[in-house]
């Protein structure tokens, strides 16, 4: 058996290993690129969440505003009735 035939398996194995390594490197590079994009956008997202928190902080006060409005409406209706209207 010539030496070239006995090394054929090695050549195939090394070629497959090289191809697998190239694919893994490409996948890892794309993952790292996406991670950098996410890292760049994270501060903007955090700022947006802070703005949402500030804008919605007064939502629990809506019940108080509604109760005050209903009390004012009731007082106005009572005054109107007292004035004969």
Image (cartoon, helix red, strand yellow):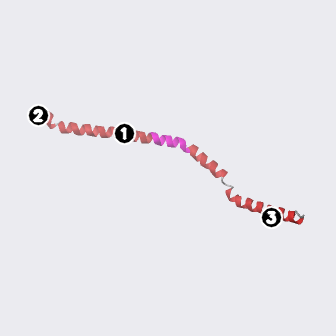
Q: Marks 1 and 3, Cα distance to the nearest angstrom? A: 73 Å
- Ranked by sequence position, the earlier of labels 3 and 2 is 2
| Secondary structure mostly seen in the magenta stretch | helix
For the record, the magenta segment spans 33-42
Which residue lies at the image location 32% right of the left edge and 39% below the top edge?
A: 21
Which residue lies at the image location 21% right of the left edge and 36% below the top edge?
A: 11
The magenta stretch spans residue 12:
no
Query: Crowding near pointer 2: few (<14 within 10 Å), some, many (20+)?
Result: few
Instruction: Name the mark on residue 85.
Output: none
Q: Estimate the x, y position of residue 27 in percent, counting from the top left.
A: 38, 41
Could you tell me which secondary element the residue under label 3 belongs to?
helix
Asked whether disc 2 touches disc 1, contact meaning CB atoms under 8 Å apart, the reply is: no
Which sits in the foreground, 84 or 79? Answer: 84
Q: Name the residue under label 2.
A: 2
Q: Quadrant of the C terminus?
A: bottom right
Q: Mark 1 points at which residue?
A: 25
Which residue lies at the image location 68% right of the left edge and 59% below the top edge?
A: 60
Could you tell me which secondary element the residue under label 1 belongs to?
helix
Q: Marks 2 and 1, Cα distance to the nearest angstrom? A: 36 Å
**Rendered view: 79 above or below 44:** below
Instruction: Name the mark on residue 74.
Output: 3
The residue at the far left in this view is 1
Q: Quadrant of residue 78?
A: bottom right
**18 relative to 70 in the view: left or right:** left
Q: Marks 3 and 2, Cα distance to the nearest angstrom? A: 106 Å
Could you tell me which secondary element the residue under label 2 belongs to?
loop
- Ranked by sequence position, the earlier of labels 1 and 3 is 1
Q: Estimate the x, y position of residue 18 in percent, counting from the top left.
A: 29, 37
């Amino acid at each position: 058996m010539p030496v070239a035939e006995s090394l054929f398996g090695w050549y195939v194995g090394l070629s497959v290993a090289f191809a697998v390594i190239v694919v893994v490197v490409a996948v890892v590079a794309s993952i790292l690129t996406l991670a950098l994009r996410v890292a760049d956008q994270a501060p903007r997202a955090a700022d947006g969440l802070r703005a949402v928190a500030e804008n919605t902080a007064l939502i629990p006060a809506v019940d108080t505003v509604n109760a005050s409005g209903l009390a004012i409406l009731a007082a106005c209706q009572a005054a109107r009735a007292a004035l004969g209207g």
